[in-house]
Amino acid sequence: MYKYSEKEMIDGLISWDETIIKYIIKINYPTIKSMVLKYRNTLLNPMEIFHRGLYILRDNLLESKFKGQSIMSTYLYSICRNLCRKEFKRMEGFTELSDNYKGETFDTSDKTEILDKLLILKNKLSEDCKEIINLRLRIGERDPESSEYRSYDEIAQIRNIEVANARQLFHRCKEKLISLVKDDQFLNKYLKNNVK
């Protein structure tokens, strides 16, 4: 297989040359896939993270934000790692769904396991509840810069309902999820000592 130079890869990415894109995927995807899977988060799809990272890298090249201080592969890895961290941080909002739970002292492996459990429980809720929780916590969104909770005003506009109804629906669904959490032995093992 022909080994493209750094300049050829950069030029090929800017022009979106299919042959060079395939080459970039071939040499970079396995490493990034391994990094993404360490988060043990079923919502973090390695190929999706990789493609998002690739688009961000291309945008940065087009806007001259990439200064060549590191090799392109290292820069792409950093972008994908930051995407994972931001997504994971956003998903950690689940552990803050109730003001009743405070002071968690879990290590990263505990948090990812808890997150996986919470996502499974969330998927047991009604479609309305899943949608309102996803909207409020911005779950699954592609914009890596949006880490703040979505406002009830914005949720109301998206769902074409009153702001008070958006707030009430979220809190009702949050309580349903909390109830499922309390019934889950695994989660209670970590959370029962933090109930105020």
Image (spheres, grey):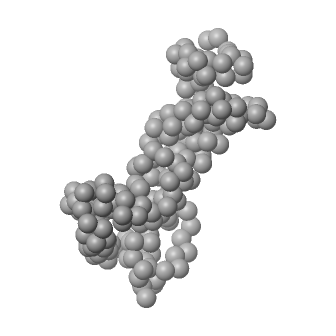
Q: Which residue lies furthest to the bottom in this view?
A: 196
Relative to 99, residue 154 above or below: above
* Depth order, front residue of 149/38: 149
Q: What is the x, y in percent for residue 24? A: 59, 24
Coordinates of residue 146 in the picture (x, y in percent): 50, 54
Work out whether 193 lies above or below 5: below
Identify which residue, 34 or 126, lies in the foreground: 126
Quick check: can you spot residue 53?
yes
Residue 117: percent from left, percent from top = 37, 62
Instruction: Give me the residue at 52% from left, 48% from top.
Output: 144
Label total for image: 0
Is any atom of residue 177 visible in this view?
no
Quick one: quadrant of the N terminus?
A: top right
Q: Which residue is found at the position 45% from the left and 44% from the top?
A: 142
Residue at x 45% of width, y 63% of height: 149
Q: Quadrant of residue 118?
A: bottom left
- State the residue lying farthest toward the right: 69
The residue at 53%/71% (across/down) is 106
Of 196 and 15, the residue lying toward us: 15
* Outermost residue, left side: 126
Q: Which residue lies furthest to the top in this view?
A: 2
Dividing the image into 4 quarters, which one contains the C terminus?
bottom left
